[in-house]
Image (tube, grey):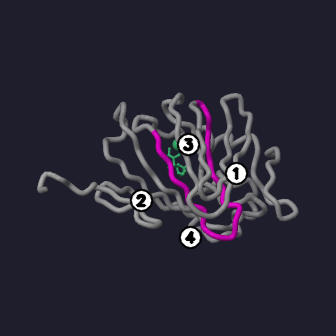
Amino acid sequence: MNNILLPVAGFSGRQLTGNKINKTVRKIGDLKTIFSDQAAYGDTSPDKIVYEVESYLPVKEGTTGGLFFGITFIQPGKVGDEYFMTKGHFHKIADRAEFYWGIEGEGMLILMDKYRKTWAEKMYPGSLHYIDGYTAHRTANTGASVLSFGACWPSDAGHDYDSISQRGFSKILVQENGQPILIDRK
Ligand code: S6P
Ligand code: ZN
């Protein structure tokens, strides 16, 4: 029996455990160019946590052929009418795809192709999302509780955040009459 090892990482309840887990916290103050209503952004405390990511990185970032696994937790909230959301990115190696799946709460996966066409898919516990290569992706919490979702992506994909922080997505997800709706970015 002594050649049988426990896995080096685990997923217990809401948390990833193990020694190759990377944790990232994104606060309002880290998301300056992300939200479109800059006046409302300025009125929100920079220390407020918007989302956290726990990632299991079993191989070195950039390794071809490996996989990464992560859980993202987005707090409920809005900046103006726009829901709390992730920064969003294309992958640096642009053809790399990714899976997302909903774990708890409700939200939207916002997708934008290389021609800047933007659409969204509903996220809920058990929803499964295939994100094709060349497609920018960000997630928004449209509910009243934490939205968490899993992700699995190639270890050489990398992240291109600059394209999004400079030009954003072509549409934004806002609350209108109590409902999430995608509207053109001004
Ligand atoms: C990684 C994957 C997710 C995001 C996370 C936070 O490729 O898509 O783990 O990193 O949801 O989003 P962002 O846009 O801040 O990386
Ligand atoms: Zn990604």
Residue in the picture at 73% in, 39% down: 118
Q: CA distance from mark 3 to mark 1?
A: 23 Å
**Sequence-first tag of 4 and 2:** 2
On residue 122, the disc is 1
Q: Name the disc covering residue 23, or none.
A: 2
Is label 3 in contact with label 4 (beta carbons under 8 Å)? no
Query: How much space separates mark 3 and mark 4, taking CA atoms?
Result: 21 Å
Circle number at residue 47: 4
The residue at 50%/34% (across/down) is 92
Residue located beneath label 3 in the image: 161
- 58 relative to 167 in the view: left or right: left
Q: Earlier in the sequence, mark 3 or mark 2?
A: 2
Residue drawn at (54%, 62%) of the image: 73
- Helix, strand or loop at label 4? It is loop
Name the kind of residue labelled 4 in the image.
Answer: Asp
> What main secondary structure does the magenta stretch of the protein show?
strand
Q: Nearer the viewer, mark 3 or mark 2?
A: 2
Q: Is residue 110 above or below residue 125?
A: above
Q: Residues within 10 Å of mark 2 (few under 14, many from 20)?
A: some
Asked if ligand 1 lies within 8 A of label 3, the reply is: yes
Name the amino acid type tagged 3: Tyr
